[in-house]
Image: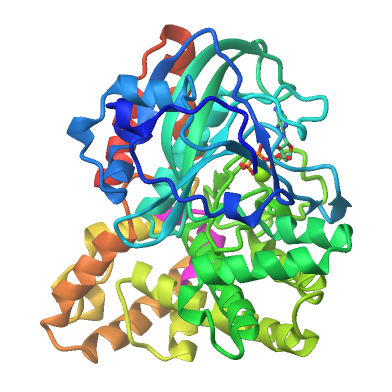
Amino acid sequence: MNPTLEMQSKSTSTNPFLRLNYEPAMESLGEDYADVVAAAQFPLHLLRWRNDRVLTQIGLDPAQVSDDDFIEAFGHFQAVRPFLALRYHGYQFGEYNPQLGDGRGFLYGQVRGIDGELYDFGTKGSGRTPYSRTADGRLTLKGGVREVLASEALYRMGVRTSRCLSMIETGEDLWRGDEPSPTRSSVMVRFSRSHIRFGTFERLHWHGRADLVRKLLDHTIAVYYPHLWGKESQDALFYAELVQRVARLVAQWMAAGFCHAVLNTDNMSITGESFDYGPYAFIPTYDPAFTAAYFDYSRRYCYSNQPAICYWNLEMLQTPLKLAMSGADLTAGLEQFKEHYRSAYCEIMLHRLGLETLSVPEAEEIITLTLQFLAETQMGYNDFFIKLRQEFHANWREDVKNIWSQDSLKPKDGNTLAEPQIKILDNWRSLYHQFLIRLPIEEMEAIAQRLIQSNPLKILLRPEIQAIWEPITLEDNWQPFYDLIEQIQAS
Ligand SMILES: Nc1ncnc2c1ncn2[C@@H]1O[C@H](COP(=O)(O)OP(=O)(O)OP(=O)(O)O)[C@@H](O)[C@H]1O
Ligand SMILES: [Mg+2]
């Protein structure tokens, strides 16, 4: 790949971002997967968010990185490597779309984390590319704010997710159908375990390039599944592990009460990581039909459809992979999805209930009762787990009557519980008590700790986002935004 951009010489810069050891992993694949692009020039650069926690993950000391360093690298886009707009297609709402690709972003560079994994710095809102079609290549400020918040909230909840490294306001007026316009602009840098999407493979199948599928598959396994590299059945093992990772990811969303909203195959990472937070929402109450995107008329991506959609996406991925590997291995890999999902979901939900080491049927019994109660009462989905965290006491083990104080659990309307709801709760209580008495008293502290770990006190519901967005739009006051992130991370 012949970079035409002028690069900053690493040795002359004092900017830590320009001195990182960028690995040309994607570049090394050659010219068939990406286009070299230039970044837009913006009229303004205001650093609105820097993620110091991500800095430490790549071995940088936040104290040694100035705001100007962020702006130089991720606002003015001082280059170290060529910027690559990655090519991809994808199934969007079930329809194949061959007109996709990074239309408002590019791969800035790839760096090794201190954990030994390779991470992407991928931009969003950095200008037009050959894949922008008629759109402006930009990201709204609200879009940037929402993605920062989603990724921090999911990260705190233990979801395998990308994070935002930086978000810079860029001073342009944007026009959008779903925001009062003109609306403010931003550019974001995402820190993720690869931007290779299911749709990256789908595009190669569309062009009939079995050779390029093979090459990308080798790359994916060597870089992102290195423990499988060189094994005789590495392709089969790779797909089986991807299925397992995706099943676990969707179980994490479901347990967290997260509705991604746009599970197109171009938004599915080949590393089984969650990313691209557009019209997402956390469910306010337990409602299987909850749909986050207003334009999702058929409710294709509603909360409870997410496991089936992830399965379908994995199935669609078989088409390009079949150009390089055995169809029987793909079928066998996907067959494990349901079982992986079931056990991951049980494990994570049990943790949210403070428990561990129950058999899957036992776990399902208490989880079913929990969901029944939440469906019947429509109390806040995450509020239930927060209340459990706050109320759990070692004396619950002594007597079933100690479990839940009198009116700690209220239905959505604030009234006291109705007869059928009390009945479900009583069943829940006695089952929970049965589990507790099986455990030694010392285990009660471990339960309390699990409840703290799995049930953060701050949940990112839509009113929370609205509440920080108003001060930003009305008086350019960013303090509530920073406070909210602080609360998310600390709770
Ligand atoms: N404002 C825009 N300008 C140019 N292209 C856009 C714009 N918004 C979306 N696109 C393109 O439309 C397609 C679908 O967009 P989608 O919102 O899923 O991705 P994205 O949010 O831009 O990027 P990512 O998936 O990395 O988060 C992508 O090809 C994307 O690049
Ligand atoms: Mg996307």
Q: Position of residue 384 (x, y in %)?
A: 39, 58
> Magenta segment, principal secondary structure?
helix
Where is ligand 2, by quadrant?
A: top right
Whether residue 146 sits left or right of residue 135 in the image: it is left
Give the vertical position of 270 relative to 190 (above or below).
below
Q: Residue at x 42, y 79 (%)?
A: 427
Q: Residue at x 59, y 91 (%)?
A: 232
Give the vertical position of 472 relative to 453 (above or below).
above
Instruction: Pick the quarter of the image with the N terminus.
Output: top right
Q: Position of residue 422 (x, y in %)?
A: 44, 68
In reply to whether residue 18 is colored magenta, the answer given is no
Q: Position of residue 213 (x, y in %)?
A: 74, 66
Q: Residue at x 37, y 88 (%)?
A: 358
Q: Which residues are magenta?
A: 370-382
Whether residue 241 sits left or right of residue 322 in the image: it is left
* Depth order, front residue of 173/394: 173
Kindly indicate the quadrant of the structure image that contains residue 206.
bottom right
Give the vertical position of 462 relative to 259 (above or below).
above
All told, the count of numbered labels is 0
Q: Residue at x 26, y 48 (%)?
A: 59
